[in-house]
Amino acid sequence: MPSEIRQTWRFSRSQEEVWEYLTKPELLELWLGKMDFRPVVGHRFSVKGKDGCLIDCEVLEVRPFSRLAYSWRTASVLDRRPFDSLVVWTLVPDADGTELRLVHNGFVAAEDTAGHHAGWALCVGRIVERLKGQASVFVDLRWPLREIPRSK
């Protein structure tokens, strides 16, 4: 069962500009939701999920303009039991802009992996919309949804 999500986007913007969408509360609110986020290791914050559930997070790593990691604790769609996972954003410069990579791992149920996979694609798609004219196309979704096995 896949327990990890990997997604990649490419922007014709600098790492600093893309970083702002991952770390500034007023920009985070545009694509992920309202929260009290601060890019400081140890800072705890919460995100309200689309289904109304509360996602508890803690900033684990901050390397300005290149890497951001935080814990992600939410309830499973299967049994509403909480599970812990890890979200890691990596920004890689290239000749024409920035590649944004997401790795989210620690899932225990395929349904949770699938839901988060679709959710991240939708949410980061909002960044792409905000940076249109300067953002290029979605580069890669490496985890085909049709291969998700059902949990028992």
Image: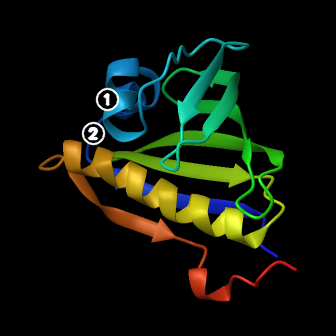
Local SS, label 1: helix
* Disc 2 packing (10 Å; few <14; some 14–19; many ≥20): some
Q: Give how far across and how far down residue 99 sits, in percent.
A: 43, 49
**Residue 110: x and y, percent?**
74, 71
Mark 2 vs 1: CB contact within 8 A: yes
Residue 49 pos. (x, y %): 53, 43
- Locate residue 73: give its quadrant: top right
Q: How is the image coloured?
A: rainbow
Q: Which residue is under mark 2? A: 13
Left or right: where does residue 132 sit relative to residue 64? Answer: left
At x 37%, y 25%, the residue is 20
Query: What's under tag 1, amino acid-wise?
Result: Glu
Judge from the rendering whether residue 143 lies leftward or rightward of residue 18; answer left or right.
right
Distance from the alpha carbon under mark 2 to that under mark 1: 6 Å
For label 2, the SS is loop
The residue pinned by badge 1 equals: 17
Residue placed at 57% from the left, 50% from the top? Answer: 102
**Residue at 84% across / 61% down in the picture?**
108
Quadrant position of the C terminus in the picture = bottom right
